Image (spheres, rainbow, N blue to C red):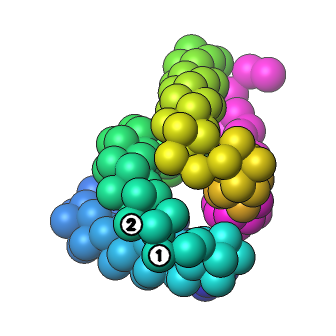
Amino acid sequence: MKKLLLTVLLLLTTATFAQDVDSFVELLRSDVKTKKKAIITEVMEFTEAEASAFWPVYRNYEFEMEKIGDARVALIKDYAENYEKMTDAKAGELMDRAFNFREKRLKLQKKYFKEVSKILSPVKAAKWAQLENQITLLIDLQIASELPLAEKPEGSEQ
């Protein structure tokens, strides 16, 4: 997985590969969705009734989360395009967007915890929210481990 993300970052630095990168991101998303569904199914141990109530709500959650994820992908692309010529203004803009992404994601997670609590017991909904959070943290860690820390280009004033 690390090598895949590194490949994405390398491709992001060249605008001519933009369409290939988008295709690659979609492939990764599809793979993550499949694996997440398998993990959720195994860990949650849904009854048939719970599963039939949960999965439609979860699909809506995934759809909305994907929109937020699109903003993250755009942010990573913008960071990669500006990494070697980073300015204070650009760094501030990128961080504002990163904080905005996290706020939107948290708001959506809260919204869907309430939705899932209506169809499952609150304890089972909490279990799902914890599991979702753990998976999200693992993905975030993987992405963060591949992104170089921001630095001003050599020769520019610090």
Q: In this view, does 156 lie to the left or right of 70?
A: right
Q: Do the residues labelled 1 and 2 touch (CB within 8 Å)?
A: yes
Three-letter amino acid code at disc 2? Ser
Mark 2 burial class by Cα count in 10 Å: few <14, some 14-19, many 20+: few
Q: What residue sits 66% from the left and 48% below the top?
A: 121
On the rendered image, what quadrant is the N terminus found in?
A: bottom right
Image position, residue 8 (x, y; %): 46, 70
Q: Which of the two residues, 53 or 56, is positioned nearer the viewer here?
A: 53
Three-letter amino acid code at disc 1? Glu
Q: Is mark 1 on a helix, strand or loop?
A: helix
**Residues drawn in magenta:** 134-158
Mark sitting on residue 140: none
Image position, residue 15 (x, y; %): 28, 57
Q: Which of the two residues, 142 or 91, is positioned nearer the viewer here?
A: 142
Image position, residue 28 (x, y; %): 42, 75
Q: What residue sits 31% from the left and 69% below the top?
A: 26
Residue ID for mark 2:
52
Q: Which of the two residues, 106 or 157, is positioned nearer the viewer here?
A: 106
User: Does the segment drawn in magenta span residue 15?
Assistant: no
Q: Quadrant of residue 143?
A: bottom right
Q: In which quarter of the image is residue 74?
A: top left
Residue ID for mark 1:
48
